[in-house]
Image: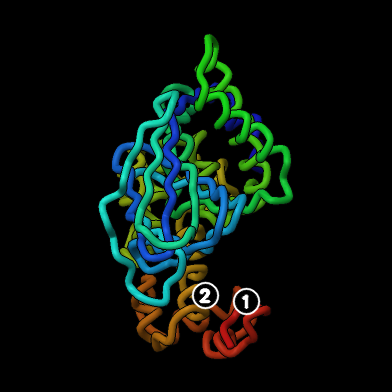
Amino acid sequence: MLHLDRILDGLDVDIAPFAICDIRRDAGLVIQEDRATSIHYILAGEGLARLAGGTDIALKPHTVIIASPGTRMTVTHNDTHPPALPTPNCQPLPGGWELATIGDGLSGVMLACGTVEAVHRQTTGLFEFLRAPLVERVDDEPAFREPFHRLLRELAAPMPGTRALAQALMKECLIVLLRRHIDDVEAEGHWLAALSHPQLGRALAAMTDEPRRAYTLQDLADLAGMSRTAFAGAFKAAFGQTPMGFLAAVRLRRGADLLATTDLPVKTIAGRIGFASRSHFSRAFKAVFGVSPADYRERPADGAGRA
C-alpha cells in the first residue's frame, strides 16, 4: 500500500515566475524544458498538445499538465493542419512574468506555464520517475483551483513573503493532484512508489522505458546497485511482486495499449514488448485479460478495446 504521507514527508517545493502563453488559432508553440519539471494550466480556450511520440492531450480550461524534464509538446488550437511555429512576441509583465503571444489570428488557447522544483528528502525529484506527463482536469476541484489562482496572483504582484507563500501554495496544489492520482499508481509504473526507493526506482524506470529488453534479475539488480538477493527481497517487500512479475505486467499493459490504439499485427506487438513469439504473448495476455489479443482488439472502445 502506498501512503501519501510517506511521499510528502520531507518534500521541498520551489517555483519560478510563470509565463502566459497566448497561442492563436493560426499558430502553434513548441514547449520543452530540458532541465526542469514544467507545469501548464489551461486558462481559457481549447486546444491540443501533441507529444513527441505522437500522443495527443486534449486541452480545455482547468486542465493541468505536469511534464518531466525533456518532454516536448507542440501546442495548437486544433490538429486540422500542421501549424505555423512563429517566434513568440514576448512582453515583460510585473513580478518577472512574461506574456508570449504566438500568431496573429483569433484567440485559440491560453496557458499559464512555469517550472516547479519538488525534491523528496533533498535527494530525489518528486517527478523523477514520471515517464509520461501527468494530466488532470480540475474544473470540479476547487481545492486545486483556488490556491493555484492565489499562487498566480501572488507571483504577479510580489510582496515580502511572496516566495514562502508561493511555495506553500504550490505544495498544496501538488498534494491535491497526488490525492487524485494516487489510485492510478499501478497504471503509471509505480513512479510515485519509486520515490521512497530511489535505488529500486532506477530499475523500475528501465523496465517502464524499455520493456522489450531481455532483462535478467541480475541486470535489474545492477541498475539498482544491489546484490541480486537484496534487490529481489527489497523489490518484493516494497511493491508486493517480484521484479520479473512486474516486468511481465508492464509488457502486457503496453501490449493492451498497442492493441487498442494501433493496427499493428499481434506478432509485431509481441516483439515490440519483449515476447519471443506471438503464441507466448497470446497465452500470457489471455491469462491476465481473459480474452485473446485479437478478441481484445475487437471489443468496443468503452470496454477498453478499440472498435
Taking depth in this image into account, of 129 and 230 the one nearest to the observer is 129
- Residue most extreme to the top: 160
Residue picked out by circle 2: 256
Q: Is residue 29 left or right of residue 121?
A: left
Residue picked out by circle 1: 304
Residue shown at 57%/42% (left/top)? 237
Q: Is residue 155 left or right of residue 179?
A: left
* SS type, badge 1: loop
Rendered location of residue 218, percent (x, y): 33, 50
Q: Earlier in the sequence, mark 1 or mark 2?
A: 2
Residue shown at 37%/56% (left/top)? 73
Q: Is residue 107 above or below residue 6?
A: below
Residue 201 falls in image quadrant: top left
Give the label, 1 or 2, closer to the camera.
1
Are the residues flagged by discs 1 and 2 in contact, CB closer than 8 Å? Answer: yes
Q: How is the image coloured?
A: rainbow
Residue shown at 29%/42% (left/top)? 34
Which image quadrant: the N terminus?
Answer: top right
Residue 142 visible? The answer is yes
Residue 84 circle label? none
* SS type, badge 2: helix
Q: Is residue 85 above or below residue 220?
A: below
| Dot 1 amino acid type | Ala
Q: Is residue 53 above or below residue 29?
A: below
Which image quadrant: the C terminus?
Answer: bottom right
| Dot 2 amino acid type | Ala
Rendered location of residue 273, percent (x, y): 39, 71
Rendered location of residue 84, percent (x, y): 29, 65
Taking depth in this image into account, of 156 and 104 the one nearest to the observer is 104
Residue 124 visible? The answer is no
Q: Is residue 276 above or below residue 211?
A: below
Cα separation, mark 1 vs mark 2, equals 9 Å
